[in-house]
Image: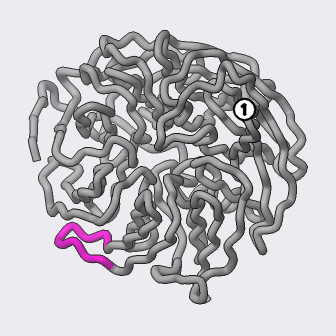
Amino acid sequence: MKYISRIHHLLVAAAITLATQLPYNALAEDYLWPEFRGPGKQGHASARNVPTEWSNTKNLDWKIKTGLGGWASPVVSHENIILAGSKEEGDQLTLHVASFKLSDGSLNWEKQIFAPSADIVKQRHSKNSHASCTPILADGKIYAHFGHFGTCALDLETGNILWKKVIEYKPVHGNGGSPALVEGLLVFSVDGNSDPAVYALNADTGDIAWKTPRHSSASRKFSFSTPLIVEVNGQKQIISPGSGMVGAYAVKDGNLIWQVQYGEGYSVIPRPILHNQKLFIGTGYNKPNLLAIRLTEQTGDLTDTHIAWETDKSAPHTPSMIAVNGGLYFISDNGILTCADPDTGDVHWSERVRGNYSASPVAVDNHIYFISESGKVTIIEANTQAYTVVAENDLEERTLASPAVWDDTLLIRTQEYLWKITKH
């Protein structure tokens, strides 16, 4: 680990209250898995007895063909599974949201939301899809985002479209970052090939509440990260990484509170996580760094004062990180899994896991699930002392979507199928 100490000021931890928008189990009574990375937005599940082994004849409740392309992760209410996806017939692309019964996988409804003209269907990266942004469930509604194709709200039970909004911009490699919901605002980044910005839409109407341009020295402006909402002394901040910088934005008006710069990092994908009063972010391509940033009430440019440590060794381009049982776990796109001390960055261990990785991991009880792009699922103990594999399973189909987990159930989206894995 390349450890860099940049402590220029002492931080009085007792004076600062830090938390994600809600603890990971606080929304369990409302929705089982309501958005990208779950109720707590950081990949933690309050589930127990989730299977570690399965096959077509063991612990598989059902497996269905979705009929929709895309790498948006599934979100789950108590009765239904919601997927965003796409269909292509000839030169016509259509974008859809569908609801499936949780009990047996049968289709409740499917709605076509957008049918963009061919001139705005830009070339996407081979690892991307036209429907890579994960929806959000809240207050009986579905909020679905398709990047430059548009954003919408639907009724959860009927699929009726409540509003649609298109923000025009020129993407690079397609869409990717999912939105975040905070105080009646739907917040997402619009980081295309020029004029990057953070937007907030009124969640009731779809009207633009505010837009804040990003100012970055990075020559490549495009990125795909999902915001994380945190609190500092009772005041919420929207943490949104982009090319060359990560910013904290005020909920009310989008004003930039503070920023940390990281040079030419671009195509930033991992969603930030918060642990022990530190934010952990990835800085994108070409050479990714992992930064540990001390959260604070201070404002302005904190680049020289608030980076606690950083590493460029096996940092992820795509998968988000996860903190479990005193360890910070991160996996590089080519399968180097590292467990580090979140306070210092010191490496406990580092091991190669078979395959390439895009999906973000999930923590279930004392286990962490990692899913490779080819569908291999490696389950390890959350153990800082040693790399211990609990089980390995093979879905035998490509997947870049992150899973959903609740109770005794694991839900995984692959290229053609949706898998509901439940202990029997």
- Which image quarter: residue 376? bottom left
Q: Which residue is mark 1?
A: 91
Residue 165 at what x, y percent from top left? 75, 23
Local packing at callout 1 (Cα closer than 10 Å; few below 14, some 14-19, many 20+) is few
Residue 23 seen in the figure: no
Nearer to me, 237 or 403: 403
Query: Residue at the front extreme?
Result: 90
Question: Measuring 86% from the left and 36% from the top, which residue is drawn there?
Answer: 161
| Amino acid type shown at disc 1 | Asp
The answer to whether residue 2 is left or right of residue 269 is left
**Residue 409 on the magenta segment:** no
Instruction: Name the quadrant containing residue 417.
Output: bottom right
> SS of the residue at dot 1?
loop
Q: Is 52 above or below relative to 355?
A: below
Q: Position of residue 414 (x, y in %)?
A: 57, 60
Tell me the residue at 22%/34% (across/down).
287
**Region in magenta:** 381-389
158 above or below 195? Answer: below
Looking at the image, residue 245 sits to the left or right of residue 234; the answer is left
Name above or below for residue 77 compared with residue 170.
below
Residue sitting nearer the eye, 247 or 179? 179
Q: Is residue 423 left or right of residue 166?
A: left
Principal secondary structure, stretch drawn in magenta: loop
Q: Position of residue 370 (x, y in %)?
A: 40, 63
- Name the image quarter holding the C terminus: bottom right
| Rendered location of residue 203, percent (x, y) | 73, 30
Residue found 75% across the figure and 68% down from its top: 102
Q: Nearer the viewer, residue 96 or 15?
A: 96
